[in-house]
Amino acid sequence: MKTFCGRANPTTGSMEWFEEGEDYDYHQEIARSRYADMLHDKDRNVKYYQGIRAAVSRVKERGEKAIVLDIGTGTGLLSMMAASAGADFCYAIEVFKPMANAAVKIVEKNGFSDKIKVINKHSTEVTVGPDGDMQCRANILVTELFDTELIGEGALPTYEHAHKYLVQEGCEAVPHRATVYVQLVESRRMWSWKKLFPVHIEAEDGEKILIPPSEMENCPGLPSVCDIQLNQMPSNDFSILSDVVTMFSVDFSKPVQSASTYYRVQLEPVRSGKAQIVLSWWDIDMDPSGMINCTMAPYWVKPTSALQWRDHWMQCVYFLPREEPVLQGEKLYLTACRDEYSVWYNLHKAREGENEAGEEEHKADVRVESPVCRCRAHLLWNRPRFGELNDPNRTHQYIKSLRKVLKTDSVCLCISDGSLLPVLAHYLGAKQVRCMQPSRIDLYHPHKLWQAFFKANHLEDKIKIIEARPELLKPSHLEDKKISVLVGEPFFTTSLLPWHNLYFWYARTAVSAHLASNVTVLPQSASLHMMIVEFQDLWRIRSPCGTCEGFDVQTMDDMIKDSLNFRESKEAEPHPLWEYPCKSLSDPQEVLTFDFTRAVPQHCLSTEGSVTLLRKGKSHGAVLWMEYHLAADISVSTGLMRLSDEKGNCEWNPHCKQAVYFFSSVIESEIQSDPTAVTYAINFDTKTGEIAMDFKL
Ligand code: SAH
């Protein structure tokens, strides 16, 4: 079997499809999976074990045999816990073949082959009966099928089916129950991920304010969940408008319904403000009494309990369809709508004289269809990109730079996806502004969005969109003029790693024939920077586990290692580091520069060197990012913004992902005695636009 994998080519900016062997997909799945993270989640593991022991005891106390159904067994961990707790037999179901194979090995290695049967099927394919996969229905149902949104991995339909066909009535379930909590907040920072704020531009002839078109204002946005490490959101970035409220619960020991439905709660704001965001998380009770509880509550909710770091379960940010001013003590209704896999929210005010009983009449108001972007902006800009465009400091850097290079006779071409630079260039006095915005598979005719945008700002005919790709640019697109100012942020939606935005350089090269001899390119250059870091927690996702609650899971570690090494050279991976604190162990170092005033050279750009470890700590890996030099003394960083103190705490650009290269072995530096150096070799292949790197500790 062959798999087709789509990946943007950073030298052409377009998607290319590669035929990969069957193995590729599975290695990607394993290497980038959250299995390691789950096995490191001590709090989760301990509580599952407690819950499973309690459930087995309850069944035994009733004098019954304990027959366990473990749906989505992964490594087999929960089944092994059940078998150790005295279960008579476990059916361990796993749909993903490589994992089912691993589970067989792990179960065998730990001596449970006679008690655990691994079945490589989707649970809905499992049969029960004398000739079936299971001899009889189970009386203990164990699963861990939850994502940050609880139901996004299909827990509800899986439970619904299991109760109908695979487990006995009145079975024990671990977890027994899940509860979803919400809290209403106002947050300029999070709201800036959903809508475009007015942009203020100081032009020659006074201040100009760029406003989004009305369809963008009222657009419900995207249905996809926004999951983040909410514990990294500083408390001064949002203000709490309500108490924490229970939105809904699911009892997993009873038949579960997956069909679309809604839940509604009444809220009274604890302070007045603008309701914009619903923060949400869940907890699971492992037993009916609720004594064994595993919670995703963020730091301000239970400040006394130690927080377990985990990446497989985080917290959700939901955007209300529109901002709603609310008053302290006023009566509000918050509605959670859900289908089988996702949840969305709506807020409305109680009507005059309305009471609980009068709630019925509001049923018609409940929006049942999930949010779909109507304005196209949410297809063009993802949430971090909205945040980036809304960042006034960043905009100011570009304005300052444009002001330096633009003249009244400038012919300006902008190459960047969904950029506001053309509008800035126009207001700052460029004579002619063109913007290159080719169509994309997911965003057909982006110019329709721009038309609406220009119309709202009376800019029709001021800025022209060129839908052609750079290599197809014709003199007629430019009214036979040469480009005197070429600008880019640069930003391209297809970029995965920081250096993929160097596509700007390739595009610049492709339009060379159209550039005036004295063209100004903004940014004039870019540089790649690197720093060695110790992660507070992120290291766990790539760290072997060895044993988990006394069970040997090394087979899993080996499997992850094999998958990471599947491609000879290890690759850097993108992570938004504002969510993953780390401390610098070395100074940041500039390792490569890219001169946009010249065409991309034929030869590779490579560098070698060493970096000294200045602080005591564990070198988990290197972080790499790009900086763009817009004008003589103005640069923007897509990575490190500040090294905030002596201890090496870092502040990262909150809108961008940085590249993380995890070292295969970790070294501990004790700088007092002898400073350690890490040597590196970094190669930018101009043919592929990719960067390969190697580090020696
Ligand atoms: N139980 C393990 C692994 C949990 S990850 C642990 O707690 O450590 C969830 C696993 O369930 C994944 O391996 C996924 O492939 C599998 N899975 C999800 N839904 C399934 C279903 N309906 N039937 C079988 N396997 C499923």
Image (cartoon, rainbow, N blue to C red):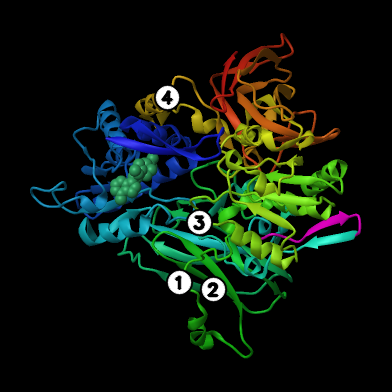
Residue 693 found in image quarter: top right
Residue type at mark 2: give it: Val
Count the marks: 4
Residue type at mark 1: give it: Tyr
Q: Find disc 1 in the rendering and name its residue.
A: 262
For the residues marked 1 and 4, what is the alpha-carbon distance in whole angstroms? Answer: 43 Å
Q: Earlier in the sequence, mark 3 or mark 1?
A: 3
Q: Position of residue 366 (x, y in %)?
A: 50, 77
Q: Earlier in the sequence, mark 2 or mark 4?
A: 2
Q: Is residue 554 left or right of residue 197?
A: left
For the residues marked 3 and 2, what is the alpha-carbon distance in whole angstroms? Answer: 23 Å
Q: Is mark 4 within 8 Å of ligand 1?
A: no
Residue 447 found in image quarter: bottom right
Residue 591 vertical position relative to residue 364 in the rendered view, above or below: above
- On whether residue 478 falls in the magenta region, the answer is no
Q: Earlier in the sequence, mark 3 or mark 4?
A: 3
Q: Is mark 2 within 8 Å of ligand 1?
A: no
Depth-wise, is mark 3 or mark 4 nearer the camera?
Answer: 3
Depth-wise, is mark 3 or mark 2 nearer the camera?
Answer: 3
Q: Find disc 2 in the rendering and name its residue.
A: 265
Quadrant where the image shows the N terminus? top left
Q: Position of residue 435 (x, y in %)?
A: 68, 49
- On whether residue 203 falls in the magenta region, the answer is yes
Q: Find disc 4 in the rendering and name its residue.
A: 561
Choose between 428 and 301: the one closer to the eye.
Answer: 428
Quarter of the rendered structure image containing ligand 1: top left
Which segment did they paint magenta?
195-205
Residue 261 vertical position relative to residue 685 in the rendered view, above or below: below
For the residues marked 1 and 2, what is the alpha-carbon distance in whole angstroms? Answer: 10 Å
Q: Is residue 576 left or right of residue 485?
A: left
Quadrant where the image shows the C terminus? top right
